[in-house]
Image (spheres, grey):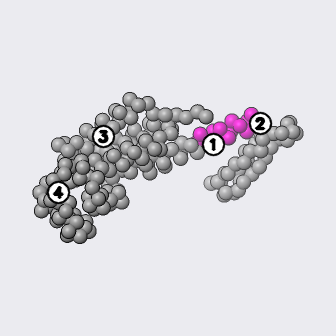
Amino acid sequence: GIYVRVHGKSWKKAKDNLRKLTSRSKCGSIVKAMERIEVYMRGWLKHYSVADMKKNIEALNGWLYRRIRMCIWKQWKLPKTRKRKLMGLGMPEWAACEGAYSRKAYWRMADIGVVKRALTKERLIKWGFYDLASAYQSMHVNIENAVTEQYERWWCAMQGTQKMKAGPSTEIEQANLSNHSNAAVVKTMVVSD
């Protein structure tokens, strides 16, 4: 079959831009950083949403979650602040101390269990993170539906069949069997207004 892919240079450019937006030194306010990410990725996804890239988007999404956790971890700076914040997010005191007093680097800590459990995907989405996987899925499905609709119209015109409008979720099968003995049967689902 024919698949539309995003070129490797486009992936690299998008990842480099996201790296700049989530830089440890220039991240600033996490909420503002997440807003900038949303603006950039919404435009990028609208441009490339016709492409098949589910696995790549999921990988990029996981990497971006880790980048955001890294920025948050760096902003907490002091061990006592980290401990207080982790306990405020529901971690037991022993786990908060274990994470807060760790000497591991920011990027490594962003993938450690205590930080991942405290700064979960759901919590980050609630704070305003733009989930790339769900955004891509909704855009890609909408485009697939539009392409399927256009293809059905073309197929019906080629086969001499008509697409009729019916009530909600009604299947209509029509075929002009007088022209061909083995004509294709076209199934359409049409929702009326």
Could you say which quadrant of the image residue 39 lies in? top left
The residue wearing badge 2 is 159
| Left or right of residue 75, residue 13 in this image | right
Neighbours of disc 2 within 10 Å: few (<14), some (14-19), many (20+): some
Task: Name the residue rendered at 34%, 41% in the picture.
Answer: 40
The CA span between labels 1 and 2 is 15 Å
Report if residue 80 is visible in the image: yes
Q: Secondary structure at mark 3?
A: helix
- 1 or 2: tag closer to the N-terminus: 1
Segment tinted magenta in the rendering: 146-158
Front position among marks 3 and 1: 3
Where does the image place residue 68, in percent across and percent down from the top left?
Answer: 27, 50
The CA span between labels 4 and 1 is 56 Å
Where does the image place residue 189, in percent across and percent down from the top left?
Answer: 67, 51
| Left or right of residue 184, residue 77 in this image | left
Q: Is residue 140 magenta?
A: no
- 3 or 4: tag closer to the N-terminus: 3
| Left or right of residue 1, residue 103 in this image | left
Q: Nearer the viewer, residue 70 or 4?
A: 70
The residue wearing badge 1 is 149
Front position among marks 2 and 3: 3
> Which mark, residue 102?
4
- 2 or 3: tag closer to the N-terminus: 3
Task: Name the residue rendered at 50%, 37% in the picture.
Answer: 51
CB contact under 8 Å: marks 2 and 3? no
| Left or right of residue 81, residue 120 in this image | right
Task: Name the residue rendered at 52%, 34% in the picture.
Answer: 4
The residue wearing badge 3 is 18
| The N terminus lies in quadrant | top right
- From the image, give the main secondary structure of the stretch colored magenta: helix
